[in-house]
């Protein structure tokens, strides 16, 4: 199932993508929650009912060409990110393979949806691109054992971890969070694809195109820490809630590692594609 969040005159609405249209769940039946995050919190029963909504005689369908898609989960409680999680990316940066996950965070101000513009800040001249697989949590949990971790995954979406390198690497101590948390620096979408439709999230081709040119091209089998490792590790520290997002790291080909470096500029168009999840497209503009 493909879940989406539609922009409507009544506000954001959870929807199910079916072929070339979307079923507005709340408009179909007000017993459905209006948000994807609340739908996930309803557990498997709520998701089964959502999957069956298209069969309802009251189903409210909207053509795909007539909707504006927001981030599939526009209101997560947490956005957790992993650095240096691809072997080939670590080699690209001449970095040792990490022995434990490198964890940082983004804030909700960073989230935008498909076709929304990435806004280049006036105070950065080195804004970079990073294609990522994003895990969407579906079940609350703390101290989750690795062997039970995938039970907490609702599904997956495509992410773009935009990064201001001149802020991220500022000073001796570095500033990963501030370099990653400018407004619009976390596009996600277009859909949340439920876990049952992704047989192996650790074998997904992933690429990023900048103005049609392939800049990153790898596979999630290059993960250093797989999804169960990440969930078990992070849940030692915090309680996961439905709708929480985990950006799982980026493959090689980032702009800062190129010779000469390549950074985003106004007029660019970035497209992240992950097999089975679709394409996330965002133009780049000046702030």
Image (cartoon, rainbow, N blue to C red):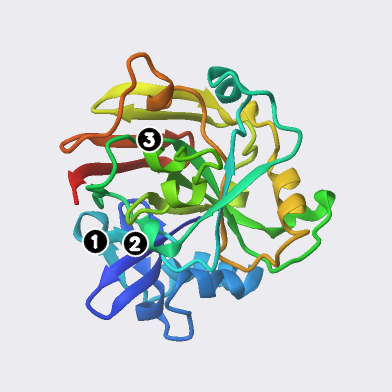
Name the residue located 60 percent from the left edge and 24 percent from the top edge.
90
What is the residue that sits farthest to the top in this orientation? 259
Q: Position of residue 76 (x, y in %)?
A: 50, 66
Residue beneath disc 2: 22
Q: Mark 2 or mark 3, which is nearer to you?
A: 3
Asked if the residues shown at circle 1 and circle 3 are in contact, with their CB atoms under 8 angstroms apart, the answer is no
Marks 2/3: CA distance?
30 Å
Q: Is disc 3 surrounded by few (<14), some (14 to 19) or many (20+) residues within 10 Å?
A: many
Looking at the image, residue 140 sits to the left or right of residue 56; the answer is: right
How busy is the neighbourhood of tag 1: few (under 14 within 10 Å), some, or many (20 plus)? some
Residue 182 place in picture, x, y as percent: 36, 53
Q: Quick one: label 1 or label 2, which is nearer the N terminus?
A: 2
Mark 2: few/some/many CA within 10 Å (<14, 14-19, 20+)? many
Label 3 residue SS: loop
Mark 1 or 2, which is nearer the eye?
Answer: 1
Label number found at residue 35: none
Q: Is 233 placed left or right of 87 in the picture?
A: right
Please give the name of the residue rendered at 61% of the width and 51% of the height, measured from the top-left corner: 195
Q: CA distance from mark 1 to mark 2?
A: 8 Å
- Give residue 102's quadrant in the image: top right
Image point 62% across, 23% down: which residue? 95
- Between residue 178 and residue 143, name the one nearer to us: 178
Reading the chain from its start, which is encountered first: label 2 or label 3? 2
Residue 129 badge = 3
Q: In the depicted view, which residue is nearer to us: 149 or 31?
A: 149
Residue carrying label 1? 67
State left or right for residue 215 relative to residue 210: right
Residue 59 position in % (x across, y down): 36, 73
Q: CA distance from mark 1 to mark 3?
A: 27 Å
CB of mark 1 within 8 Å of CB of mark 2?
yes
Q: Position of residue 170 (x, y in %)?
A: 44, 40
């Amino acid at each position: 199932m493909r879940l989406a969040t539609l922009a409507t005159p009544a506000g954001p609405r959870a929807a199910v993508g079916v072929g070339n249209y979307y079923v507005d769940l709340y408009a179909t039946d007000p017993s459905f929650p209006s948000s994807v995050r609340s739908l996930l919190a309803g557990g498997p029963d709520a998701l089964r009912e959502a999957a069956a909504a298209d069969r309802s005689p009251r189903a409210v369908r909207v053509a795909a060409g007539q909707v504006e898609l927001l981030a599939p989960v526009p209101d997560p409680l947490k956005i957790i990110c992993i650095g240096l999680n691809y072997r080939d990316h670590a080699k690209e940066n001449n970095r040792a393979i990490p022995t434990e996950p490198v964890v940082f965070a983004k804030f909700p101000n960073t989230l935008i949806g498909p076709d929304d513009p990435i806004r280049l800040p006036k105070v950065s001249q080195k804004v970079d691109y990073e294609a990522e697989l994003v895990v969407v949590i579906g079940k609350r949990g703390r101290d989750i054992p690795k062997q039970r971790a995938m039970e907490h995954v609702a599904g997956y979406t495509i992410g773009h971890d935009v990064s201001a390198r001149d802020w991220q690497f500022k000073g001796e101590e570095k500033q990963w969070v501030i370099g990653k948390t400018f407004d619009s620096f976390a596009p996600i979408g277009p859909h949340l694809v439920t876990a049952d439709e992704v047989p192996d999230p650790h074998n997904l081709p992933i690429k990023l195109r900048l103005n049609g040119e392939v800049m990153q091209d790898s596979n999630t089998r290059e993960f250093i820490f797989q999804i169960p490792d990440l969930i078990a590790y992070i849940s030692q520290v915090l309680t996961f809630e439905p709708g929480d997002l985990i950006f799982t790291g980026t493959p090689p080909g980032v702009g800062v590692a190129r010779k000469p470096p390549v950074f985003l500029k106004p007029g660019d168009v970035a497209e992240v594609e992950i097999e089975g999840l679709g394409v996330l497209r965002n133009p780049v503009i000046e702030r």
